[in-house]
Amino acid sequence: MKKCLICSTPVKWIKFKCADGNVCKQCYEKVSANFTQTIKTKTKEELLAMLKDAQSEPAGTSFEISRKINQLIFFDDKNQQICLPNHKKYTKENLKPEIYSFTEISNCQVVEEQIERLVKKKQQQLGSIKVVLSLENETREIWLIPNYINRDSMAYKTMRSLAANIVAEIKQSKEDVAC
């Protein structure tokens, strides 16, 4: 029977694969920052370092996911917080998840950049989409389409709708806090 790399308990049906073996659900929750990151390519040493980091964080920084929009933003309605998981797929670098209180958010808006370019001998409208979160001391960007793509494509239309959904959810969360 397989054992968890971290705590050595036997793992049966529910196990999470990493580079050096398997991890049980309880350990996975700790090393994946409450199920917000994958560990598929992590080694045992990296997982132990992540576990040590997770245990050294203060207990007051708990985050319970109550809603999420894809892997782009998570909401904790109980503690009135949002989490930007900074998934490597979207940020292109290893960043830790960032947690902000609903009250820290001063503004949220969709920003679309548009250009016209000749693509395959045809003039096309291209665009990129991001959601800009204005916080008390900084600005954070959630890129949905970082590279220019055709504005008539289904992918562009889907991401525009997703961006509008993110803005609406954040504004609704802020209104719920104000009440």
Image (cartoon, rainbow, N blue to C red):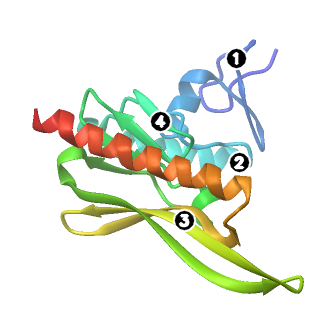
> Pointer 3: what residue?
129
The Cα–Cα distance between marks 1 and 3, rounded to whole angstroms, is: 37 Å
Q: Earlier in the sequence, mark 3 or mark 4?
A: 4
Q: Amino acid at mark 2?
A: Thr
Q: Amino acid at mark 1?
A: Ile
Q: Nearer the viewer, residue 140 or 46?
A: 140
Q: Secondary structure at mark 4?
A: strand
Q: Is residue 95 above or below residue 128?
A: above
- Compared across the picture, whether 64 is left or right of 37 comes to left
Image quarter where the C terminus lies is: top left
Q: Secondary structure at mark 3?
A: strand
- x, y percent for residue 128: 59, 70
The residue at the point 72 percent across, 86 percent down is: 117
The Cα–Cα distance between marks 3 and 2, rounded to whole angstroms, is: 35 Å
User: For the residue carrying disc 4, how many other residues have a C-alpha within 10 Å: few (<14), some (14-19), or many (20+)?
Assistant: some
- Compared across the picture, whether 146 is left or right of 40 comes to left
Say which of marks 3 and 4 sits in front. 3
Q: Is residue 21 above or below residue 127?
A: above
Q: Are marks 3 and 4 in contact (CB under 8 Å)?
A: no
Q: Is residue 160 above or below residue 26?
A: below
The image's mark for residue 101 is none
Q: Nearer the viewer, residue 56 or 170?
A: 170
> Pointer 4: what residue?
68
Q: Is residue 53 visible?
A: no
> Pointer 1: what residue?
14
